[in-house]
Amino acid sequence: MDMKLTVLGSGTSIPHPRRTSSGYWLEASGSSLLLECSASTIHRLLQEGMDWTNLDAIWISHFHLDHCGGLAPFLAGTRHSHEMKMREKPLKVFGAAGIRNLLGSFNDVYNYKLFDQAFPLEVVEIEPLEKFVIAPGLEAVAMSTPHTDESHAIHLRDPNGATLVYTADTSYTDTIAAFARRVDLLLIEASFPKNKPAKKHLELSETMHIIRKAEPKQAVLTHLYPEWDEVNFEKEIAGYEPDCEVLQAYDGLKIDIFPQTKN
C-alpha cells in the first residue's frame, strides 16, 4: 500500500474561510496516523470521509492550541461514540514530554475521564532522535526544533521505503534540511511570504533555502497565514527556481507518496 497524505487543515490559529487549523491524515501499510489534532480537525475528518474509528495513532508536534486543541474533545467523543464501543485495538497518542500532563489538565477541568476508554489508550512521550514504531509498519524518528521547548519535527518511513518529514512549526535551522535529506515528501511550514512578524516561524525565503539544501522529491508548503491570500504562489515559487515540485497546501489536498528511485 502506498503512503497517502490528506491535508485536513493547512492554516493557522487565525480564522480563515478556506483554511482550517493544522491537521494531516496519513495512510501507510494499512495503518492510519493523524498528524496534529486542532479543534477543526474533528469535523474535517468526517468531511474527508476518513475512517477515524480505526485510527491507529495521533502525533502532536507541540502544545499550541492550533495543533493540539482538538485532542481532548476528540477523546471525549471516542469515549461516548457507539462506533468505538466495540474497538479492541489500542489508540496511541505520541508527543514530547508533557503530553500526558497536558491531557491530564484537560481531563481535570470537568473529570471527563479521557483516559477511561472502551479500548486501550496509550500516551507515549518520545525521546528525540530515537527510533520508534508510531503505527504498525510505520517507523518514526523525531527531532527537536526551535519553536517551543517541546516542538519536534517527525521523519516517517514505511516498509516500501517511502519517506515523509513533517516539520510542524519552526524557526530556521540547518538541521531540518539534514533531517529531511532526500525524503519523498517534505511537509514544511511557510507561515509568511515575507517580512515575518513572528521570529519562531518560517517565511518563504527560509523555507525555500531548507528545501534547496534538503533536496526532497516533492515539497508541500503549509501552515499558511492569511498574508498568503494576496500572493501569486506559483510566481513566487518560480522565482526561486526549485529543483523539485513545490505545492501550496490547501484543505483537502491529497498526495500519493512513492519512494524515489535511488541512483
Image: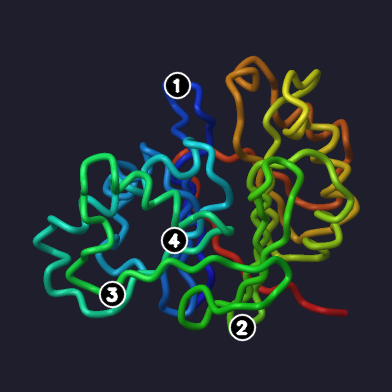
Furthest toward the left, the residue is 82
Q: Judge left or right: residue 88 versus residue 80.
A: right
Q: Look at the picture and state if 1 lies above or below 163.
A: below
Q: Residue at x 90, y 53 (%)?
A: 213
Mark 4 or mark 1, earlier in chain: 1
Q: Reply above or below: 68 against 2.
A: above
Separation (CA) of disc 4 from disc 1: 23 Å
Which residue is at the far top? Answer: 230
Q: Earlier in the sequence, mark 3 or mark 1?
A: 1
Disc nearer the start of the sequence (2/3): 3
The image quadrant of residue 234 is: top right
- Element marked by disc 4: strand
Dot 3 and dot 4 residues touching (CB under 8 Å): no
Q: Position of residue 99 (x, y in %)?
A: 49, 55
Which label sits on residue 160? 2
Labels 4 and 2 touching (C-beta < 8 A): no
Q: Which residue is mark 1?
A: 15
